[in-house]
Image (tube, rainbow, N blue to C red):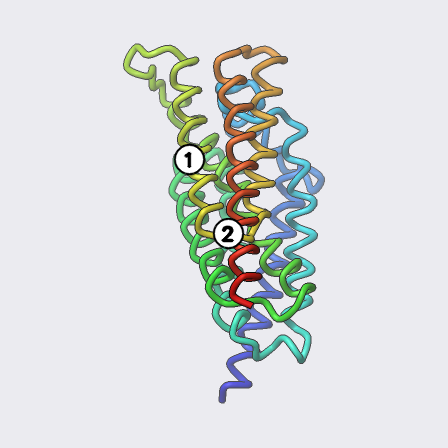
């Protein structure tokens, strides 16, 4: 019975990965769909809001999708099928893949308002998956890279994407920020994103991948605000400071954990 459940889970993850890849293909515009940055009236364009990352930032999706495909294959292997980590995290990864495709479809159909709850749920699912990887150790270095690394990168990037998505939706419905300037709002949102990155680093200790992808996204926010059509030097400076803070915090927590483990041994 337990083995049959493992097979169902493995197939579900593999099918979800296939569905997500199809969604990504459509979202790229290669299959006749509208590229994400041009869909929904350009609400997610690199110059749409002060916290929108520059276009090159989205290249990280190639790495994330590669990792997700690797995970879908890896968890199918006989030695991985019954491990505690994959039994506990598999369906969460599958849910994230379906939600990812659903988010792309919502944007393709110009349903920007719908994309907000979808990406928030996606973020919540990834947080749960990440916490499982923190609590349940991977079975070796390859498992840590493929499973922990991929989920961490995915989470870090979606943190940035969620902030950008919500901000884009608010801008699209005419939210004026209660008279507060865009620069102030930009700095405030970046501070929140940076704080989230530090909190994730503190919880994950040696899990460094969320800090990398979150910092990547914030760095490209800085690039976008120092170039292009929407310049905001305060937001750019805040993003740079946040990148340094997140990476430094992740490094400190990782070193402290490794020292503690060495002392214990």
Q: Which mark is residue 195?
A: 1
Q: Is residue 202 left or right of residue 215?
A: left
Point 69% across, 60% down: residue: 70
Q: Residues within 10 Å of mark 2 (few under 14, many from 20)?
A: many
Tag count: 2
Give whichever of 118, 147 is nearer the camera: 147
**Badge nearest the viewer, 2 or 1:** 2
Secondary structure at badge 2 equals loop
Give whichever of 252, 187 is nearer the camera: 252
Q: Are marks 2 and 1 in contact (CB under 8 Å)?
A: no
Q: Height in image: 121 above or below 264?
A: above
Secondary structure at badge 1 equals helix
Q: Is residue 170 visible?
A: yes
Point 62% across, 20% down: residue: 223
Provide residue 150's location: percent of width, then percent of height: 61, 53
Provide residue 210's location: percent of width, then percent of height: 55, 45
Point 59% across, 72% down: residue: 10
Q: What is the CA distance from the residue labelled 2 to the residue labelled 1?
A: 15 Å
Q: Quadrant of residue 75?
A: bottom right
Give whichever of 32, 168 is nearer the camera: 168
Provide residue 23's location: percent of width, then percent of height: 60, 48
Disc nearer the start of the sequence (2/1): 1
Q: Is residue 52 left or right of residue 125?
A: right
Give whichever of 232, 33 is nearer the camera: 232
Q: Residues within 10 Å of mark 1 (few under 14, many from 20)?
A: some
**Mark 2 lies on residue:** 205
Point 62% across, 65% down: residue: 14
Provide residue 232's location: percent of width, then percent of height: 51, 12
Q: Height in image: 218 above or below 96?
A: above
Q: Height in image: 53 above or below 118?
A: above
């Amino acid at each position: 019975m337990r083995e049959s459940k493992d097979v169902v889970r493995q197939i579900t993850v593999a099918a979800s990965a296939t569905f997500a890849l199809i969604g990504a293909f459509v979202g790229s515009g290669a299959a006749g769909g509208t590229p994400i940055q041009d869909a929904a009236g350009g609400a997610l364009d690199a110059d749409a809001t002060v916290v929108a990352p520059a276009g090159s930032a989205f290249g990280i999706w190639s790495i994330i999708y590669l990792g997700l495909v690797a995970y879908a294959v890896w968890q199918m292997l006989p030695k991985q099928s019954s491990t505690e980590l994959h039994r506990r995290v598999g369906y969460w990864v599958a849910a994230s893949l379906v939600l990812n495709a659903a988010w792309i479809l919502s944007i393709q159909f110009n349903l920007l308002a719908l994309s907000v709850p979808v990406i928030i749920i996606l973020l919540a699912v990834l947080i749960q998956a990440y916490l499982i990887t923190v609590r349940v150790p991977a079975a070796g270095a390859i498992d840590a890279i493929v499973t922990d690394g991929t989920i961490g990168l995915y989470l870090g990037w979606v943190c940035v994407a969620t902030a950008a998505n919500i901000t884009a939706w608010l801008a699209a419905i005419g939210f004026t920020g209660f008279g507060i300037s865009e620069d102030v709002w930009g700095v405030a949102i970046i501070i929140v994103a940076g704080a989230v990155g530090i909190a994730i680093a503190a919880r994950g200790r040696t899990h460094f991948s969320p800090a990398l992808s979150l910092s990547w996204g914030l760095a490209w926010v800085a690039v976008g605000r120092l170039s292009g059509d929407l310049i905001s030097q305060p937001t750019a400076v805040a993003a740079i400071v946040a990148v340094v803070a997140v990476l430094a915090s992740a490094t400190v927590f990782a070193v402290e954990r490794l020292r503690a483990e060495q002392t214990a041994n």
